[in-house]
Image (cartoon, grey):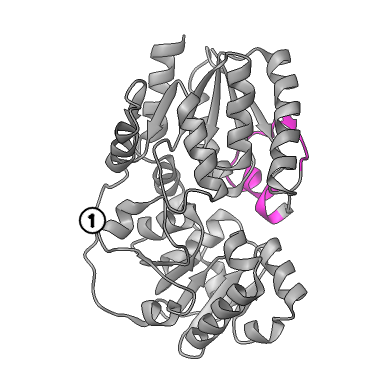
Amino acid sequence: MKIFSIIGARPQFVKEAIVQNEINKYDEIKEIVVHTGQHYDNNMSDVFFKVLNMKKPDYNLGIKASNHGEMTGKMIIELEKIMIEESPDIVLLYGDTNSTLAGAISASKLKIKIAHVEAGLRQEPKDIPEETNRVLTDRISTYLFAPSDLAIENLDKEGITQGVYFTGDVMYDIFLKMRPRFDYSMMKELSLEKNDYIMMTMHRDFNVDTPEKLEKILKDVNRVSKEIKVVLPIHPRTKKRIEQFGFENLISNIIIIEPIDYLKLMGLTENCFKVITDSGGYQKEAYFSGKQAVIIMPDTGWRELTGCGFNVLTQENKIYDNVMNTNKVDYIENIYGNGKAAEKIISILKEKVI
């Protein structure tokens, strides 16, 4: 069996790492890895291949961030060429990025079976790019690997029942595997004390591309930073917008660092008080660490965590209130399986495709 895996964004590198580890157990499976180049900053891409001991991609398309249509179109053109050349049995896709949708469209047109990891996630508003990508990918996938019971329910409501499997979440797999290697060195480097700082990430277009919205967020986070330290590994897009809009004064009290690798990020997360984020993956990584996440989004694909009250959605002017709320919330275990999602995914593909 030849698996054609497509990755392009930070969470996908993490997911591919654990699935690749499982694939390597079988001599009868050959994997072709394609990196679209969607995230091209060295600290956000290459470093994951090194730290997580992944093999270098067989192909790197080098398609950098641009308008959604332009980026997706370029990816479709290049992915189709490689799929024709490699003739894979299955195209393996992760999550909800432009790389995911481009891979799904290319494979579908060539009548190649598609496996979607993280199938069944849904969120409002329906016009955000990630929702479009995941819904369209689910519609044309052959195998839909759901990370939670709610994801299966979402697919069932849409009449998608064939080829649906509960596997759990591969991000939980990698979290458990890598936990003994988490890097806590930045605690000392940044003079941080356990449970006495906030970890923050932010990069979504609807948060950073509009001056009024970004200003409100930064003002409220600045308010938080006056009572508890806030650490922000800054995304290139966010950094660019802050400079463009002249908001440097609003981050003067925030500890700004360059993007960091998975092990360092998780080391900081394990010891923080809470997390502020608009990242889908980081919401869950906070949960895996037992840390509540305050999510700067109108909705989330990970409704299991907000539904049980562990994570909370927030408006840009309510970040402070939600971060400083100290009401205890019970931790619910095993929402995303038992840490063997990759094993289940490859087992299913071996049975169905070979």
- Where residue 329 appears, x then y in whole percent? 24, 68
Please report the residue visible at 75 percent of the width from the left and 20 percent of the height from the top.
81
- Residue 31 seen by the camera: no
**In terms of image quadrants, where is residue 171?**
top left
Q: In the figure, is residue 283 to the left or right of 335? A: right
Q: Is residue 82 magenta?
A: no
- Where residue 145 appears, x then y in whole percent? 40, 31
**Could you tell me how many numbered marks the image carries?**
1
Q: In the figure, is residue 169 to the left or right of 20? A: left
Which residue corresponds to mark 1?
Answer: 332
Tell which of 41 and 24 is nearer to you. 41
Please give the range of residues in magenta.
Answer: 43-63
Tell which of 175 and 222 is nearer to you. 222
* Mark 1: few/some/many CA within 10 Å (<14, 14-19, 20+): few
Query: Which quadrant holds the N terminus?
Result: top right
SS of the residue at dot 1? loop
- Residue 73 seen by the camera: yes
Please report the residue visible at 70 percent of the width from the left and 74 percent of the height from the top.
242
